[in-house]
Amino acid sequence: MINQWREGNEFILLENGEHYFPRVIQEIQEAKNEILLETFILFDDKVGQALRSALMAAARRGVIVDVTVDGYGSDALTADFISGLTDCGVRFHIFDPYPRIFGMRTNLFRRMHRKIVSIDGLVAFVGGINFSADQLADFGPEAKQDYAIEIRGPLVADIQRFARDALGKTAPSGGRRLRRKLRKQAAPAGDTYGRLVIRDNDKHSKDIERSYRAGIRLARSDIMIANAYFFPGYRLLRDLARAARRGVRVRLILQGQPDILIAQFAASMLYQYLIDAGASVYEYCQRPLHGKVACVDDTWSTIGSSNLDPLSLALNLEANVFIQDRAFTGALRQALEDLLAKDCRPARVSPHSGGRLRRLWVGVVIFHFLRRFPAWAGSLPAHKPELKSFIAADVQSCGEAGHQRTV
């Protein structure tokens, strides 16, 4: 079940694609029964091709493989890329596929933004890293800085069940023998507490935000947040300010080399409010920051796909793992401390009172517009997001569709 604390887990921090991709590929190569993979972005580049080859090989040896991508984030995938997978038996799913109109993507909202991999009920991966070459340092100045975790223990079963449930009616039963195998494999692997927290547009629309706020309100000495797109709601922002005012060291690491300029501009509207409360705001300037992680005091931490912005907190489908463990939180904090020491600078704010006043009013207008925009967008008449599946029997129709447009 989601949102339940599970004891007996082991968590390993994975930084950037250099650490993440080899671990995922290795586990896929060793899979015996089932692979469940969800990602916002899957590109047809060297990373996507390596993943595709590993998944095809797993399907050929009889592993049940389900891959789900987002129709907005992965809309450039061709039918040839997909049919190569389905020819081998991979079950390929697209969340909310929608054609481009005049070259523009139209499914802007309700994106499937999760990044989850579950293998055999033994190991799972959760984080913010997409399957694309821009998550590797050799991509160049636009390579992203990001994080994920490798998970073993009882929490893996929760992640597996959630990923299966997300497939709905298309989820394979696997037969009694497979179900017995998978039930027996969620053995304790450590002594760490963890829970999977998701955000959807139904019963769990506020769960990730509430979990963040609970951690911030309980903080006694230190809060450290690294987030790519930072524009939270007023309650979370107020909790951060109150923590700083009561003497908690609050440090935010945000984008200094943005991949989306408006995102950095929006975040900068909040700098003065936070700094006036006593928080420290830094900008990571080595390359675009794509991480979504946080540490509170010595034992509380989180890694996942959720930004602290209106899209992630009010529209997108997201998944974070929250952890209670001194060793893991210490490892994550040390990684962020290293980032802060080497490649960050204090955020710059205008020293002029007149400029600050105008900036404040602009910030208020932008803040309230962006914070309410998801609710307005969600209330407009819209189709219900669907999951379109391609399995072996549909290979030919998939190819025919691909000749008409990319999917």
Image (cartoon, grey):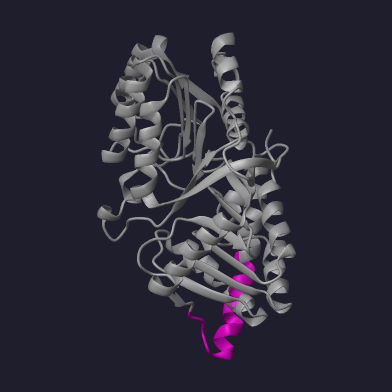
Up-down relation of residue 69 to residue 357 (above or below) = above
Q: Is residue 215 magenta?
A: no
Viewer-proximal residue among 268 and 330: 330
Q: Residue at x 62, y 50 (%)?
A: 323
- Which secondary structure dominates the residues rendered in magenta? helix
Image coordinates of residue 289 in percent, x first then y, are: 43, 60
Q: Which residues are magenta?
A: 348-366
Q: Position of residue 217 (x, y in %)?
A: 74, 64
Foreground of the two, 102 or 193: 193
- Is residue 354 within the magenta segment? yes
Query: Where on the picture, by quarter, is residue 91?
Result: top left
Quadrant for the N terminus in the image: top right
Q: Position of residue 92 (x, y in %)?
A: 43, 23
35 left or right, relative to 252: left
Q: Quadrant of the C terminus?
A: top left
The residue depicted at 35 percent of the width and 63 percent of the height is 287
Pick whichever, 20 or 239, lies toward us.
20
Relative horizontal placement of residue 317, taking residue 144 as reference (left or right): right
Residue at (61%, 76%) from the top-left corner? 279
Q: Is residue 394 left or right of residue 156?
A: left
Please say whether residue 150 is visible from this viewpoint.
yes
Residue 253 location (% of width, % of height): 50, 67
In this rendering, the count of numbered labels is 0
